[in-house]
Image (cartoon, rainbow, N blue to C red):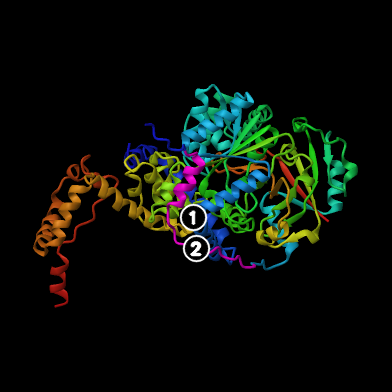
Amino acid sequence: MVSEEPIMSSREKILSAIKGISIEPKALPEIPDFHLTGELVEQFIRSIIGNKGEVMSRVEFQSWIGTAHFSKIISLSKTFEDLSNLALPEDPHELEDLGLAILEGQFGVAENGAIWLEDPNLGLRALPFITEHLVIVLERKNLVETMHQGYDRIGSAHSGFGVFIAGPSKTADIEQSLVIGAHGAKSLRVVLL
Amino acid sequence: MSHPENATEFLKDQAKAKWHDETLWFVRDKRDRISKTIPEWEQLRELASQIKDNVLANLGSYLEDFERNAQKNGIIVHWAEDGEEHNRIVLEILQKQNCKAIVKSKSILTEECHLNPYLEKYGIEVVDTDLGERIVQFLNQPPSHIVLPAIHLKKGEISELFHEKLHTEKGNEDPTYLTQAARIHLREKFLGAKVAITGVNFGIAETGEFVVCTNEGNADMGVHLADVHIACMGIEKILPRRKDLGVFLRLLARSATGQPVTNYNSHFRSPSPGKEIHIILVDNGRTAQLAREKFKNSLKCIRCGACMNTCPIYRRSGGFSYGSTVPGPIGSILSPGLDMKKYSTLPFASTLCGSCSDVCPVKINIHEQLYEWRQEITKTHGEFGKGLSMKLASGIFNSPLAYKISGSLMRSALKALPDSLIYHPLNTWGKSRNLPETPKETFQQWYQKNRS
């Protein structure tokens, strides 16, 4: 007689192996409300500069963009809507030679310069990575202290994709020498309103 | 090959070995400096450790939550018992897409599963897109460090390699120039790939999302241009809550490279319209490690590499000397769990100084586990190189008379013995060690003269 042992899937095998191991229960700790001492804007600017980005005022940005020559610009920022000279394509491959993307950040984290953006801010997920240069527009009132306040801010919001961007693309894989512009944007400018 | 044999090979180029040692120490120093700017640093380490304790105690139910939530978000979830099954699942997805070329961002798990050679056997071109990984891939080498894959190479070697592979100027060693050449080369690969593979830093049970962290942006360049994203995740990468990321993202980059955060921290929750996200949950020895009471904590590891940068043995012997996918202290407690015989020398490649445990962001007791593995290995394998001399020593230390006699014998012997005998190839102890100057009298003789 052929024994009819049911064939277990890998899922069942892994879960039943785990079930068979007795591990003393450990409670999930609550995360205390850590804070940052010092001035928020100052800390944020210092963090962005440390990450090799740049922080600008609206006036500084306007004078910079006046002298910069980008043939292709996509702006999804309501503040600088008129700078767009290209419509968002359907296929991100068409962004291959995009010079500048201007996006709106939801909030920035002072302790490390990380800025949160979600699908509605990005238009296409590839946009902040494939563009040669990146500008993120952020309001001062949207700065938080640490990543803890950052995740409190995100809360249970549901977006298909979200990203913390903290600086321009960089690498130090050749003899630990820092090089800006590995695969993603070669520069990050944050316009603080 | 054993760790000491491989290390000997690495140390032949003394100037390079010295550079390796100093460069990694520099990274360790950066980690120290940035960690001291966070007053709650030690509290964060403790929290991270406690969160991971809770994960290990409830792994099954968190994995089920993760799967259910990910599926709700439109992610396709697969389970793989071992590396082979993981590779087979990847191949099936590629074949269904009729895909012959893929881009891959850093994933230590796919290294562990030997995915590249497997796919190449089926005629699929795999391009590693992290700069350091692309460099070692050109050389047919594995990464020598989990965060700094090409740390064993000097820019002259990379310049020569890029001249051959990417037709850069001969002799141009400028890192900016070389990186730019790689950017152009890899951009073409990103634009051409229909499928992109990434690793996973964290998977969140309560939301079914997963997080991938890079500095270069290579993971995002790959997946957002491709139609299909395959994410490979070890089952231990689970975190219970989204807010736990606050703790772990504060620790990860600071511990790894001394940066306040990685540049791109991407949270994947559901695919873009018309695209696919697959996640493969891989066991490959992890449940077996979870069952080992003394070693289960090694599964808390978040792959920051801090223990490598601080380890006096790693810095002076190089990643390849370990012969395992994850080298260094953490690798030396993970690898024997996969194959105790093959990796039997690794837990001995340590001074047990404990620096690895001190810098670990999730407070794994690495050096204690190294010591525990030594007990296990000695019990299982019995006869080791050091076996006989250690037994002799134990006989001597057990008898006061034997100790006295052997002491005086040793003092004359140390003076009289020719170096050729002490530094004999059969005497492994003599390798890279100098014998101490011998005192003229014993401690007992000195005490009687001076204190009695």
Viewer-closest of B352 and B125: B125
Quarter holding the N terminus of chain B is: top left
Letter of the chain that mark 1 sits on in the rendering? B
Rendered view: B213 above or below B440: above
Viewer-closest of A88 and A72: A88
**Can you give x and y, in whole percent of width and height, for residue A76 in the image?**
83, 44
Residue B33 numbered tag = none
The secondary structure that most of the magenta stretch takes on is loop
Q: Secondary structure at mark 1?
A: helix
Viewer-closest of B297 and B65: B65
The residue under the point 78% across, 59% down is A142
Residue A26 numbered tag = 2
- Crowd band around label 2 with a 10 angstrom C-alpha radius: few (<14), some (14–19), many (20+): some
Q: Are marks 2 and 1 in contact (CB under 8 Å)?
A: yes
**In the image, residue B335 lies in the stretch drawn in magenta:** no
Q: Is residue B255 visible?
A: yes
**In the image, residue A27 lies in the stretch drawn in magenta:** yes
Outermost top residue: B123
Rendered view: B7 above or below B103: below
* Magenta stretch in the rendered image: A8-33
The residue under the point 67% across, 68% down is A37
Letter of the chain that mark 2 sits on in the rendering? A
**Can you give x and y, in whole percent of width and height, for residue A38 in the image?**
70, 67
Q: Secondary structure at mark 2?
A: loop
Find the distance from the CA under tag 2 to the CA under tag 1.
9 Å
- Crowd band around label 1 with a 10 angstrom C-alpha radius: few (<14), some (14–19), many (20+): many
User: What amino acid type is highlighted by mark number 1?
Assistant: Leu
Q: Is residue B126 left or right of residue B332?
A: right
Q: Is residue B303 visible?
A: no
Q: Which residue matches tag 1?
A: B56
